[in-house]
Amino acid sequence: MSSGSGGMFPEMAAQYWVTACRVEELPPGGRKLVKVNNIEIALFNLKGVIYAIKNRCPHRSGPLIRGFIDPAGGIKCPMHGWRFDLRDGSSERPAQAAVYPVKVESGLLYLCV
Amino acid sequence: MQLEQSDKLIKDEYAFFLQEKNGWSLTAGPQDLELVAHALRVLLHARTTPDFLADYLALVDCQGEDGGWSPFSADRESTVWVSAFCGLMLIRGNRLLHHERLARSVRKAIDYFLAAQQPDGRWVDPRWADLDTTSHPVSFFNVVLALDEPHRRSDVLRAWERGARFILDHQSADGGWYDNDFHPSGVEITAHLIQDALVADLVIDNRVNGVRESCAKGASKLYEWQAADGSWDEENVDHTMDCTRSLMVVTRILGDGGGEESIMRGLRWIIANKNPQGWGDFPGMETNLERTCDGLDTLLKYKAYRNENPRDVVRLWGYVP
């Protein structure tokens, strides 16, 4: 199993790794909502790669955990269809979703928040 | 559902809504204007608008020079969708408030929408699907026409008809409207278009051919899409409220008694899935103010829907004075 965005954010000085859940709680194809530092984060396991994105859509706060995954690695909000790339949170809409680096160690899944 | 039960819910939820006033009132500071417009609609339908003149004047204060509004009150870049919602609340509110500043603001908003319409009749907003966006200025113009606002009336009539025609021309053969990016399921957009844009024509002046058939097909599609538990769109609270309200006004205007069972199932699901105070976006989610405003609006419209005179519920969309 690999992490979706771990190691891509070397500039994050004030952030630190926090345990999110046990890895077996997020099997391939699964999704899970966790709350870390009072932030709701939606976790997705796409074919063994784990992605973490802030749960609330920047448009109207729709819950991305209930969104629709597409084959290109995007998530569409269930409220009004805004799509975000799970790798970097980018969107064709006037918004950027927050994504979080992920790492797995000793059976635990960590998020950098 | 018994009316007494809905009256009690309305009373309790309205008290909660007032308790959360700092979260939606412009008198408390800058706000998300979509939420503000949702709140002003509750005030209108609860018949408490005259107690909130300061909120309406504050909405005028954040109108842009071009006559539009930005999604956030402190910003200055006008966008169509939220501008239509704000303009609609002002023209409807001013029926009760009779304030010259509000009247001037409505005329500026009319200018904004006339200037922003595209050559093919649509309006665009990067935050919303074109069809959904178009339905909002059409809805605003519905009320401008219904209330006999004279400002640039012939221009408004032309723009309104072109907008309505754009929507009609994009209805699918199955009766629904779809947008692959924003609304692939078609549920919410279909509910919006028939209630906000099209059906008003049947009570204003029957100007656009095909509206009655289009609305009937749209309503049929909503019946078909409803889940056995009464909800729409995978238990989406927002979309279930949209569909339930849409069927209330559309079936009343069409004289379609077949919608009653669907409306009641939708309403029962909405009530069964409310939080102790307010509603969230999906069952079990925490309450948010926008959904709570939608929930209150649904209950208030249901109360009017139960009245024998069909104009009572139509009035809550502003299509009759």
Image: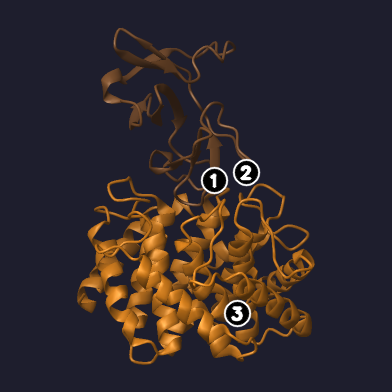
Reading the image, the residue beneath label 2 is A93
The chain drawn orange is chain what? Answer: B
Q: Are marks 3 and 2 in contact (CB under 8 Å)?
A: no
Please tell me which of labels 2 and 1 falls first in the chain. Answer: 1
Q: Chain of mark 3?
A: B
Residue A85: percent from left, percent from top? 55, 33
Can you tell which mark lies on residue B267? Answer: none
Badge 2 and badge 1 both on one subunit = yes
Q: Chain of mark 2?
A: A
Amino acid carrying label 1: it is Trp
Foreground label between 3 and 2: 2
Classify residue B81 as left or right of residue B272: right
Amino acid carrying label 2: it is Arg
Tell me, yes or no, if residue B316 can be seen here.
Answer: no
Amino acid carrying label 3: it is Val
In the image, residue A14 above or below residue B142:
above
Residue A106: percent from left, percent from top? 30, 7
Q: Residues within 10 Å of mark 3 (few under 14, many from 20)?
A: many
Classify residue B303 as left or right of residue B197: left
Q: Residues within 10 Å of mark 1 (few under 14, many from 20)?
A: many
Residue B172: percent from left, percent from top? 55, 69
The quadrant the C terminus of chain B occupies is: bottom right
In the image, residue B18 above or below residue B48:
above
The quadrant the N terminus of chain B occupies is: bottom left
Kind of element beneath mark 3: helix
Tell me the residue at 34%/64% (across/down): B14
Reading the image, the residue beneath label 1 is A82
Q: Are marks 2 and 1 in contact (CB under 8 Å)?
A: yes
Point out the residue furthest to the top here: A106
Front residue (pair B12, B255): B255
Tell me the residue at 75%/69% (across/down): B120
